[in-house]
Amino acid sequence: MVGINHIGENVIDLECIVADINGAEIRGIDVEDNGKTNTKEALVFPDSNKNLEFVIYDPTVNKYYQGRISTSSRGIVNENSLLAVTQKFDQFGGLVPIDETIYSLSKGIKLKVTRRNPGGGAINCGTAIQVFLNSLNATDMINRVVVPNGDNWVRDFLKDKYNLQEYRPQGWNTGAGLNVNISFEGKTFTLRSPYNLPYKNKKGYDLDFVQEGDFVVINTIKDKEYLDGLLGEIAKKNTKKILVATDSSIKSIGRGYIQNLLQNCSVVISNDQELDILVNDRDKGRKLAEEGKYEELATAMQKIGGNDKTVYTTLGKQGIAVYFGGHIYKQRISVAEFQVDTENGCGDATAALIVLYAILGYDPLNAMVDANVAGQIKATESSGIATKESITQFKEAYRLAPIEVYRQSEKRFVPISEGR
């Protein structure tokens, strides 16, 4: 019996609609980009809301919250504009419980929760893998998420709906952070919860359930002390490690720490901007998937991969790339036109298939193709989670883009049929 252990953190995603926009609007604004001025869509807050405040009513638990958006978030254009193309922003200090009166009087954007979902990279990845395993009726794998903090609602939801187990090795049980996903005028804005420090009642790092030969997937951890403790226990056993290198982890525990960590991992997963941060020591990553930067993308993947690692890099609407065996392959998203419902969670859906196929020993090219499909299934249906059947159906419904290989001598990708 092989165990898959997703090491990460526990958050709850609050899916929200706008109850009262309070003067904010989505419109085009001029943005300086590499010396050029371009007009891009942004969510612009009114002068009456300089603090970028928002308030939330959650009828599922009958609670009210107040929060602010951190002005240090990537995608903040000026003091009151958020780029719609960025989509993910950080909360300033997290959500604060308030009463109904403060909610009513607030000049911030008023949000209403439509549903709650367990969230966080580890839980999202673990859930997607469990759904896929269920579709295969697989009984020879144990899939679990390992989190430092917990919420009993999350634990029960995962077990009842997906048969996915949640473990809290330290027993800290301090609840879960709250992410906020806002749907407004066809755009989705994610306001990410900060890490909830300090944790109390630390009880050690009991990982007896991790066995020799298990797989450990390290995904979005923001507490260095916690990760140090877990890795110390994991080092006592012969496990295989997979790293999902996210920007929030890099920002929280340091680029150097992640760079050292990936040396002991057989598979590394990131997006192109995270790859740029890791390899080129940048505070803000560039989109290496853009035309003209393919040489930099190839160099970065080769540097991370070396001689013994498989490196997957998601490229947003440009698709996905994989480095293995000394070569880099790429596939764009489907060449057919389809309606995009959301881009939120597509990276986790893609990573889940990569992780599972790596564990099953599948060829990296097959993993790249099916992971690319899994991300597109999520994009076309916000609640969509890939199964063996749905991947087959997608391939039959849409004409997939051809696989390309990077030709070093020409510094470009060419169809694999043309050779390297």
Image: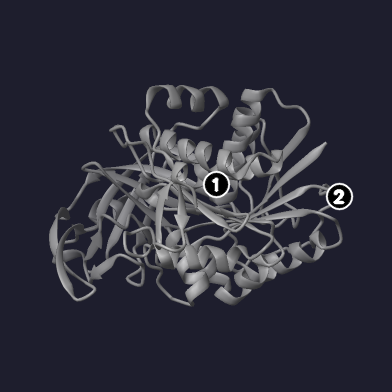
Residue at the (48%, 48%) spot, across then down: 419
Cα separation between marks 2 and 1: 23 Å
Q: According to the image, label 2 marks what residue?
A: 212
Residue 280 at x, y percent in the picture: 48, 75
Q: Is residue 83 left or right of residue 94?
A: left
Q: Secondary structure at mark 1?
A: helix
Q: Quadrant of residue 383?
A: top left
Residue 204 versus residue 335: which sits nearer the camera? 335
Coloring applied to the structure: one colour
Mark earlier in primary sequence (2, 1): 2
Q: Quadrant of residue 207?
A: bottom right
Q: Is residue 152 visible?
A: no
Q: Is residue 327 left or right of residue 308?
A: left
Q: According to the image, label 1 marks what residue?
A: 351
Task: For label 2, count other residues whose C-alpha is less than 10 Å away and answer few (under 14), some (14-19) or many (20+).
Answer: some
Q: Amino acid at mark 1?
A: Ala
Residue 182 at x, y percent in the picture: 32, 47
Q: Secondary structure at mark 2?
A: loop
304 lies above or below 324: below
Q: Is residue 408 visible?
A: yes
Quarter of the image that includes the N terminus: top right
Q: Is residue 398 left or right of residue 243?
A: left
